[in-house]
Amino acid sequence: MTSTIEIIPEEWISTTGTLQDNVAGILDCRKNPLPVPYAVKMSVEDFRYHGGPRWCELPPRHLLLPILVDTEEDKIVMHDGLAEKWRADIRIGPNVTYPDVALPYRHVLWRPTPLLEDIFQILEENTQPDKRSVIDLGCGSGRDCVYLAMRGWFTVGIDIVPKTCTRAQEFASRHHVTEQTEFHTVDIAELEYPENSFDLVIVARTYVPRSLWDKVFSLIAPGGYLLWHHFLDGCNHPTGEKLLKKGELREKFDSVVDIVIDEEKELAAPDNRPCSHFLCRKR
């Protein structure tokens, strides 16, 4: 099959105009793109070197990532940058467009923490619309903060790496939620927020020393939620005390919370590491 296309393939968008279930959206890296639905505009230069500021906007790796480029050289750059870790389907198509203007032409490829996406409706139904606030401990690129800010939450992200917080701020700016987001370079041990400050505390793939668990819990307002999504015993990375033991979160918090979810699940292939899916509500 030739990699040069004139129309959007049906394996990306169906004949009825819907994005295929296994497709994240379209990464459009053409210099002067004609309108394509479900597309996010980026540059080939964003992916020439690994770990650039826009890598955090890529989708989960188990989903197909269609990519449009202008030239064979661009295709080689994108293949070298992404093909080993993403299911990239790279096509040359400088003149590709799509005729149905009724389809969504604003889209994002990235996803938040899977557990957050799964339980978002629970949060919406059980928190007050005018006061929804969250702190993300070890926020990384800021996806969870931006996901919630785009839905009306006031979000605070903290991380110990200054460059990470800078990129999270840039990420929030690209999604037009700078007024609803704050990012700070600080260690969890040095947090100075008063008790009962947040409706939601997120710990997602972040190691929190057990000596700080009570401090983390104190940040949650009565009736607020704690979401904890972290690696379990059995992972080859991380290792040792940085892993959660099975049932450890329930044992720690059971007497002071109502447990909503307490499950063990593997990350999507090809990762497959076991993780906690834990959500509780403070009494």
Image (tube, rainbow, N blue to C red):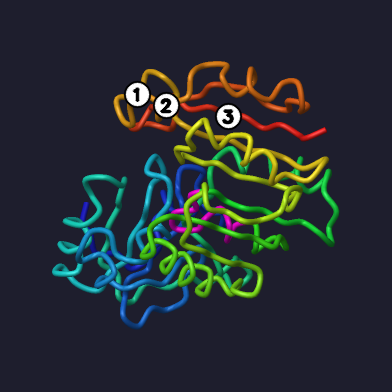
| Residue type highlighted by circle 1 | Gly
Which residue matches tag 2? 243
Q: Residues within 10 Å of mark 2 (few under 14, many from 20)?
A: many
Asked if disc 3 and disc 1 are in contact, CB closer than 8 Å, the reply is: no
Left or right? Give the position of 224 relative to 150: right
Q: Is residue 7 magenta?
A: no
| Residue type highlighted by circle 3 | His
Residue shown at the point (65%, 62%) measured from the top left: 149
- Residue 20 is situated, as x and y percent measured from the top left of the image, at 50, 47
Asked if disc 2 and disc 1 are in contact, CB closer than 8 Å, the reply is: yes
Residue 240: mark: 1
Q: Quadrant of the C terminus?
A: top right
- Residue 111 is situated, as x and y percent measured from the top left of the image, at 51, 50
Q: CA distance from mark 2 to mark 1?
A: 6 Å
Q: Name above or below for residue 262 compared with residue 86.
A: above
* 200 and 70: which is toward the camera: 200
Left or right? Give the position of 38 relative to 72: right
Q: CA distance from mark 2 to mark 3?
A: 14 Å
Q: Nearer the viewer, mark 2 or mark 3?
A: 2
Q: CA distance from mark 3 to mark 1?
A: 19 Å
- Badge 3 element: strand
- Badge 1 element: helix
Residue shown at the point (35%, 24%) measured from the top left: 240
Magenta residues? 138-147
| Residue type highlighted by circle 2 | Leu
Which residue matches tag 3? 277
Q: Nearer the viewer, mark 3 or mark 1?
A: 1
Q: Is residue 140 magenta?
A: yes
- Badge 2 element: loop
